[in-house]
C-alpha cells in the first residue's frame, strides 16, 4: 500500500472514530433528557397519589367540601416548607369533573382551550409541563349511585341546595332544642331528623308515628336509603335527578398538575454543554493525531529516501571499483585500435574503401569510448558539496553551452519563473540541467519549443521543470526511463537520465516524468531547498 493511500485510510479512520464519539454523545444526551423527564413524571405521580390519599381521608359519605380542600392545595402549591414538592416546581393544581371542567383551581391558570392537553395526558410547552392524572377511586360513571364517587361542592352550594328544598342546614346530628332547630308542637308528632329525599313533607315518610331511634334496628327507612344511595346526610332530601345532576357537575374525575421544567432544562443544558465539550476535545484529538500521522509519514518518507540513497551509494562504491578496473583495461586497447585505424587511413597506398572502413572503425571506437565514459560517470560515488546557487543563472549558462545543438534544430528555448536561490552542488546540478535539456533537444522536432520553469512549491521548497513538445513518453515507460540502459532514442546511451536520478536522490530530491499537454514530456524535480 503506497503512502498516500495509507494516509487517506488513517484520516478516514480518525474521522469515523470522531463521528462515533459524536453519535455516542448524542445518544447519551437523549438518555439524560429522558431520565430527567421520567423523574418529573414520577414526581407528578407522587403528588397525585398524595392528593388521592388526602381526599380519601377528607371524604365523608362521598363528599368533600371545597372550603376544606382549597387550603390543602394552596399549601401544596405555595408552601415553602413542603417536603413533597420543591419550591417553585409545582405551578398549579386543577381538579376536573367528568366533563373535563375545572372544579377547583389553585395556582397559575391553565388554558384548557387546547384539546391536546387533556387528550395526550402530558403536554410540554415552553417552561411548563402539564400532567393529567386520574384520581384513584374517583372514576365512576355518571349514573353511579353506589357512593364510590368523590363529590367536591362549595359549602354555599350545599346551603343553597338545602334552602331550595325548604330546609335549613342542620347544625346537629340529633333532634332537640337549639338555636337552629325548634321543638315540635305538643300536639304534633315529632318529625325525623332528615326528611326523605325528594320530599319536604313529613307525611311522605309513610309513617304516622315517631320514628324509632336513629340507627336502631327498626329504622328500615333510613337503613334502606343509606344502603341504596349512601348519599351524604345533607343531600338525602334531594330528588334522584337533582342528585345525579349534582354528581355529574361536581364529581371528581381527574387531576391536572402544571409543573415547572426549569430543573429539567437546566439539567439538559448542563449535559448538552458537557457533550459539546467531549465532542470538541475528541475532534481536537483527532486533528492532533492526523497531524502527528502526517509528520510521521513525512519523516518515514524522508528516512526511506535516505536509506535508498545510502544503498545506492554503497552499490555505486562497489561499481566504482569494477568501473575503474574496466576503464583501465578497456581504454588502452581502444586507443590502440583507434590509432591503428587512423594510420591505415593515411597510408599513401590506401584505397578509398580502406579509408572508409578505417573511418568507420574510428567512429565506432569513439562511440564505445563515450559509452564507457558514461558508465564510469554513472558508477562514480556522488559526494554532494552544497553551496548557495542562483538557479536561473545556472540554467542560462547550460543553455548557452548547448547553443549549437539548439540552433541546429532551430528550437525556441524559454526560461520562466522568478529568480530563486537554492542549496545544491553546483557541478552536479549543472550536469543534471545539461542532461535534461539535451534530452529535450533530442526529443524535440525541428522548430520545436522548450520551456524551463522554476517556481516555489512551498514556504521553503522549489520545483524545476523542463518541458518539450516532442513525441512524449508512453505511460508504461515513465518509471522505466530512469533505469540504466533504457532509452527511446536510438543514438542515446541509456545512462543520461539514470545519472540525473542518481544526482537528484543524492541531494534528497525527487524527479518524475509527466505528460505535457497537448504533447511532449515534462521532467519535474521536487523538494529543492530554498534559501532566503
Image: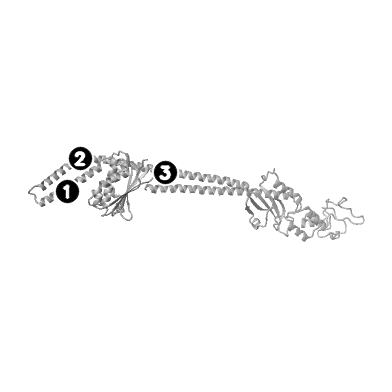
- x, y (%) of residue 480? 29, 50
Q: Regarding mark 1 in the picture, which secondary structure is present there?
A: helix
Give residue 298's quadrant in the image.
Answer: top left
Query: Label 3 crowding class (10 Å Cα cut-off): few <14, some 14-19, many 20+?
Result: some
Q: Is residue 401 above or below residue 225?
A: above
Say which quadrant the C terminus sits in.
top left
- Residue highlighted by disc 2: 325
Q: Earlier in the sequence, mark 2 or mark 1?
A: 2
Disc 3 versus disc 2: distance between alpha carbons? Answer: 48 Å
Badge number at residue 85: none
Q: Regarding mark 3 in the picture, which secondary structure is present there?
A: helix
- x, y (%) of residue 295? 41, 42
Asked whether 365 or 25 is in front, the reply is: 365
Q: Regarding mark 2 in the picture, which secondary structure is present there?
A: helix
Badge number at residue 363: 1
Residue 170: tell me if it is visible: yes
Q: Are marks 3 and 2 in contact (CB under 8 Å)?
A: no
What residue do we see at 70% from left, 46% from top? Answer: 78
What residue do we see at 73% from left, 48% from top? Answer: 72
Q: Earlier in the sequence, mark 3 or mark 2?
A: 3
Disc 2 versus disc 1: distance between alpha carbons? Answer: 24 Å
Q: Are marks 2 and 1 in contact (CB under 8 Å)?
A: no
- Residue highlighted by disc 3: 293
Asked whether 431 or 501 is in front, the reply is: 431
Query: Label 1 crowding class (10 Å Cα cut-off): few <14, some 14-19, many 20+?
Result: few
Amino acid at each position: 500500500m503506497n503512502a498516500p493511500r495509507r494516509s487517506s485510510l488513517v484520516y478516514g479512520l480518525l474521522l469515523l472514530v470522531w463521528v462515533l464519539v459524536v453519535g455516542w454523545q448524542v445518544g447519551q444526551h437523549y438518555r439524560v433528557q429522558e431520565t430527567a423527564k421520567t423523574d418529573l413524571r414520577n414526581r407528578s405521580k407522587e403528588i397525585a397519589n398524595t392528593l388521592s390519599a388526602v381526599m380519601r381521608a377528607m371524604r365523608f359519605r362521598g363528599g368533600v367540601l371545597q372550603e376544606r380542600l382549597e387550603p390543602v392545595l394552596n399549601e401544596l402549591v405555595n408552601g415553602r416548607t413542603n417536603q413533597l414538592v420543591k419550591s417553585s416546581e409545582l405551578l398549579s393544581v386543577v381538579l376536573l369533573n367528568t366533563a373535563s371542567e375545572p372544579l377547583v383551581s389553585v395556582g397559575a391558570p391553565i388554558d384548557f382551550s387546547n384539546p391536546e392537553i387533556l387528550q395526550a395526558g402530558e403536554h410540554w410547552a415552553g417552561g411548563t409541563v402539564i400532567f393529567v392524572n386520574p384520581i384513584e377511586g374517583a372514576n365512576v360513571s355518571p349514573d353511579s349511585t353506589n357512593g364510590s364517587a368523590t363529590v367536591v361542592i362549595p359549602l354555599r352550594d350545599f346551603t343553597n341546595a338545602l334552602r331550595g328544598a325548604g330546609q335549613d342546614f342542620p347544625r346537629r346530628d340529633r333532634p332537640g332544642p337549639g338555636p337552629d332547630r325548634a321543638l315540635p308542637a305538643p300536639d304534633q308528632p315529632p318529625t325525623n331528623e332528615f326528611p326523605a329525599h325528594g320530599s319536604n313533607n313529613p307525611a311522605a315518610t309513610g309513617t304516622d308515628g315517631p320514628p324509632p331511634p336513629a340507627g336502631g334496628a327498626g329504622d328500615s327507612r333510613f337503613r334502606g336509603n343509606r344502603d341504596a344511595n349512601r348519599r351524604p346526610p345533607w343531600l338525602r332530601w334531594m330528588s334522584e335527578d337533582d342528585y345525579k345532576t349534582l354528581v355529574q357537575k361536581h364529581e371528581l374525575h381527574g387531576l391536572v398538575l402544571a409543573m415547572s421544567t426549569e430543573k429539567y432544562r437546566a439539567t439538559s443544558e448542563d449535559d448538552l454543554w458537557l457533550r459539546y465539550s467531549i465532542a470538541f476535545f475528541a475532534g481536537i484529538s483527532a486533528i492532533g493525531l492526523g497531524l502527528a500521522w502526517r509528520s510521521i509519514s513525512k519523516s518515514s518518507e524522508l528516512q526511506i529516501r535516505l536509506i535508498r540513497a545510502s544503498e545506492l551509494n554503497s552499490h555505486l562504491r562497489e561499481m566504482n571499483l569494477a568501473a575503474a578496473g574496466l576503464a583501465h583495461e578497456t581504454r588502452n586497447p581502444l586507443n590502440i585500435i583507434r590509432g591503428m585505424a587512423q594510420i591505415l587511413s593515411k597510408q599513401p597506398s590506401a584505397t578509398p574503401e580502406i579509408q572508409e572502413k578505417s573511418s568507420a572503425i574510428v567512429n565506432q571506437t569513439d562511440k564505445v569510448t563515450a559509452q564507457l565514459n558514461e558508465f564510469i560517470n554513472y558508477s562514480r560515488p556522488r559526494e554532494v558539496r552544497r553551496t548557495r546557487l542562483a538557479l536561473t543563472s545556472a540554467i542560462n549558462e547550460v543553455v548557452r553551452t548547448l547553443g549549437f545543438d539548439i540552433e541546429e534544430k532551430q528550437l525556441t528555448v524559454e526560461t520562466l519563473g522568478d529568480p530563486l536561490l537554492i542549496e545544491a552542488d553546483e557541478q552536479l546540478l549543472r550536469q543534471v540541467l545539461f542532461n535534461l535539456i539535451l534530452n529535450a533537444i533530442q526529443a524535440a522536432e525541428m522548430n520545436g519549443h522548450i520551456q524551463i520553469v522554476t517556481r516555489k512549491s512551498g514556504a521553503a521548497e522549489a520545483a524545476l521543470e523542463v518541458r518539450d513538445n516532442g513525441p512524449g513518453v508512453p505511460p508504461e515507460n515513465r518509471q522505466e526511463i530512469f533505469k540504466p540502459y533504457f532509452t527511446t532514442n536510438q543514438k542515446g546511451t541509456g545512462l543520461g537520465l539514470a545519472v540525473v536520478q542518481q544526482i537528484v536522490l543524492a541531494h534528497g530530491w525527487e524527479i518524475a516524468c509527466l505528460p505535457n499537454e497537448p504533447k511532449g514530456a515534462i521532467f519535474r524535480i521536487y523538494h529543492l531547498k530554498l534559501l532566503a
